[in-house]
Image (cartoon, rainbow, N blue to C red):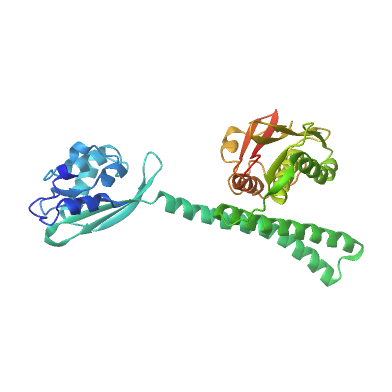
């Protein structure tokens, strides 16, 4: 910014040290003097608004910059010349203003025009993309969680209300079962929310110990076999002949396997088979869960491991998930220093690979 002439006569204090400090700001700054000439700016301003550096020089008029922004459509629809003149009038009048706009690359820029003493005018711009995305995510999270909690709570409340009023009659046992199933669903959602929060905040604890991965995978299949068979889906298991030791958190890996196997079963048709395969690679154990279900679209695959990711809420068997399970799986696998990979094709099926280091 030294060629920007931050040392103009109107700003004798703007020496090299001041200019270097200006360049360290995470917001863009442009200062005009009383004759609407550029006196100070930093490269953040140029970069955030994607402007040609040739427009910036000590004492350069600001009007060409305004004209460019109008021609580019940054001031909205309409005749660029008319829009540029309206902006120039506001600049000359030193009208304070602020607002936001989204750039072509998706970034959201907040701008603030501030009148100063001696006719100076300061333009500040700031990238607020992360803030706005975080706010939107918070709103979506609250909305989704509220919906997920409301459904089982409504069912439980309705069933208990009927029982309390004595209207249950011969259906009392069924009402109790409905309330119980929905209370379990509610508990699972709360536990998933707690798990994902800890995993993504880095506060989740892991207890690593040497495990024979063959035994661990066998245990995970046996735990989930009754569930899969209840859906009419069989599970096949393929294991290496020799022991395959690895340092893992047994409980956490069982949690990952339970999610992957149950998902494979839920999204497979009745009468189909799910394969769970364990293989040794150079320095990792690879667990593969393979199904011949309906697969996923490319768009959904890209956001698969985000919170509440759902492509179609109902599974092949009409069951509804929370959309948190795969985000939890990724957090657990990441915590092991491993990786989780998905290969999928609509109408063909899906393969999840989990690669875990053999040693820590």
Q: Quadrant of residue 312?
A: top right
Q: Is 334 above or below relative to 192?
A: above
Q: Residue furthest left?
A: 9
Q: Where's the N terminus, which quadrant?
A: top left
At x 60%, y 48%, the residue is 335
Which residue is at the far bottom? 165
Residue 303 seen in the current view: yes
Q: In the image shown, does 44 or 211 lie closer to the viewer?
A: 211
Q: Position of residue 156 (x, y in %)?
A: 76, 63
Which of these two is toward me, 178 or 30? 30
Measured as percent of width and height from the top left, residue 205 is found at 63, 56
Q: Position of residue 290 (x, y in %)?
A: 73, 33
- Residue 50: image location, x then y, percent: 29, 39
Asked if residue 47 lies left or right of residue 121, the reply is right
Q: Is residue 267 left or right of residue 43?
A: right
Query: Of residues 135 and 357, which is closer to you in this image?
Result: 357
Figure quadrant of residue 283: top right
- Tell me if I can see residue 62 in this picture: no
Seen from the viewer's position, the closer of residues 15 and 46 is: 15
Is 246 on the left or on the right of 80, as rendered? right
* Quadrant containing the C terminus in the rendered view: top right
């Amino acid at each position: 910014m030294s060629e920007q002439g931050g040392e103009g006569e109107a700003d004798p204090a703007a020496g090299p040290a001041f200019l270097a400090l200006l360049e360290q700001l995470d917001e863009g700054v442009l200062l005009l003097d009383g004759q609407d000439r550029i006196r100070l700016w930093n490269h953040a301003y140029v970069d955030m608004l994607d402007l040609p550096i040739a427009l910036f020089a000590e004492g350069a008029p600001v009007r060409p910059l305004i004209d460019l922004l109008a021609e580019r459509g940054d001031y909205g629809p309409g005749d660029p010349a008319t829009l540029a003149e309206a902006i120039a009038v506001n600049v000359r009048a030193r009208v304070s203003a602020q607002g936001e706009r989204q750039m072509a690359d998706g970034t959201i820029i907040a701008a603030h025009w501030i009148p100063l003493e001696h006719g100076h005018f300061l333009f500040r711009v700031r990238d607020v993309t992360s803030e706005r995305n975080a706010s939107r995510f918070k709103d979506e999270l609250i909305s989704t969680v509220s919906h997920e909690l409301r459904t089982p709570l409504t069912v439980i409340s309705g069933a208990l209300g009927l029982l309390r009023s004595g209207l249950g009659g011969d259906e009392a046992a069924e009402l109790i079962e409905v309330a119980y199933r929905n209370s379990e669903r509610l508990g699972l959602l709360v536990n998933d929310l707690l798990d994902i929060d800890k995993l993504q905040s880095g506060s989740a604890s892991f207890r690593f110990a040497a495990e024979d991965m063959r035994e661990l995978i066998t245990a995970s299949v046996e735990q989930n076999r009754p569930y899969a068979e209840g859906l009419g889906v069989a599970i096949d298991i393929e294991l290496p002949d020799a022991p395959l030791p690895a340092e893992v958190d047994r409980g956490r890996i069982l949690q990952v396997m339970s999610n992957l196997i149950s998902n494979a079963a839920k999204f497979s048709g009745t009468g189909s088979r799910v394969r769970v395969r364990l293989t040794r690679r150079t320095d990792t154990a690879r667990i593969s869960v393979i199904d011949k279900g309906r697969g996923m679209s490319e768009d959904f695959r890209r956001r698969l491991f985000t919170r509440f990711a759902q492509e179609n809420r109902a599974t092949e068997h009409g069951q509804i998930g929370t959309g948190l399970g795969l985000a939890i799986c990724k957090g657990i696998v990441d915590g092991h220093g491993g990786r989780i990979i998905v290969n999928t094709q609509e109408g063909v099926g899906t393969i999840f690979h989990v690669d875990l280091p053999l040693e820590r």
